[in-house]
Amino acid sequence: MIRPPIIPEGASPSVVCLGLSALDRIWRVEVPFSGGSEKIRAGQHVTEPGGMAANAAVAVARLGGTASFWGRAGADEAGRLMAKSFAAEGVDTSQFCLFEDGASSVSGVIVDEQGERQIVNFRGHYPVDPGWLPLSSLTADCVLADPRWPEGAQALFAEARRLGIPTVLDGDVADTDVFERLLPLTDHAIFSEPGLHGFGGENIDGALERAAGFGCRMVAVTRGGDGLIWQDHSGRHHMPAPSVRIVDTTAAGDVFHGAYAFAIGARLAIADALGFASSVAALKCTRPGGRASIPSLDDLKSS
C-alpha cells in the first residue's frame, strides 16, 4: 500500500544534489549471471542517464521541487547525453561541468524478472578539486550528496552547515575514510544495507550507533522489502516497506534519497519525510526502468 503524499500544497523546495551522474545501459533478462564464464539472453536493452545524486535531482524536479545538479562528466557523447536529459527534466545544470580531458561515468545494469539488478560501473575520470563550485552564493532549502565525489561533498556540506542548510548523505558503498570525512557534516545520513555493513559491520544496531556517533541528527538504513530502520534523538525506529508488486528496483535508492531531501526541504518532520520517501521509491519500483520510472507528485496522489 502506498501512503498518500503529505507535502504541503504548492511546496517547491530548492535542493542541490552533488555527486555521480552516469549513463546507464540496461539489459532485461530472465535470469542474471550466476558466476563464471557464461552468456545470457536479454529481452530488452535501453540506454538512459542515471547516477545516485543525478537521479535524486530528477526525483526532486518531478516532485515539483527546484533541483540543481552539481557534478562532473567528460565532454564526450555520454556527458552531452546526460546534460541534455537534465535540461529536459528542468534540472539546473549550470554547475554540471563537462571536462574536455575527462571521461564520463558509464554503468552496465542487468535486471531480472524479479526486478533485482546487477551493476558494473566505470566511475569516470575528471579533476577532484571542487574549487570551481559557487559555494559563496549557495542558496537552498536542502543539499544532498552521494559519496562518489567526497571532495565536492565535503566542501558543499561544510558551507551548508555554516549557513544552516540541512544536509542529506546518500550512504552507498564507499571507503570508510569517506564516511569519516562526511558524517561530521551530515544532518541526515541514509545508508543502503551494503553501505552500512561496509562502514560499520554486519550488526545493524551497532553500525547505526557508530554512524550516529559522528553527530548526525538522524541515521537510517534502507532494507528494500524489509523496510527501513532509523535512529534519532528519540531512539531507534522501524518503518515497514509499502506493499507493492516489484517490477524494477533500479534507482530506487536514488529516488528515496531525492524524495527525502525534497521532504526535508519542505520542512516535514523526519518520520513524515521517511514515509514520503518510502512511498515515492515504492511507486518507482512498480514500473520498468530507472530514471524513466521516477514518479511525480500527481502519480503518487493517484496511486
Image (tube, rainbow, N blue to C red):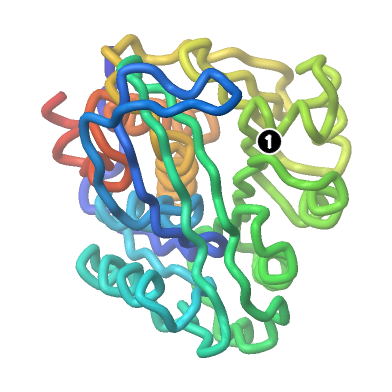
Q: Position of residue 303 (x, y in %)?
A: 16, 24
Residue type highlighted by circle 1: Met
* Residue 8 or residue 262, whichever sits in front: 262
Please state the horizontal and vertical placement of residue 177, each as a whole percent of the image.
87, 51
Q: Nearer the viewer, residue 234 or 178?
A: 178
Q: Quadrant location of the N terminus?
A: top left
Q: In this rendering, would 185 be left or right of 33?
A: right
18 lies above or below 92: above
Q: Against 49, is 232 above or below?
A: above
Q: Tell me if residue 235 comes above or below residue 163 in the rendering.
A: above
Q: Residue furthest left?
A: 302
Task: For mark 1, give the secondary structure.
Answer: strand
Which residue is at 88% across, 36% downward? 213
Q: Report the residue marked by disc 1.
A: 218
The correct choice, above or below, for 165 with respect to 234 in the image is below
The image shows residue 70 at horizontal and vertical percentages of 51, 72
Name the spot of residue 126 as percent of width and height, x first. Answer: 62, 77
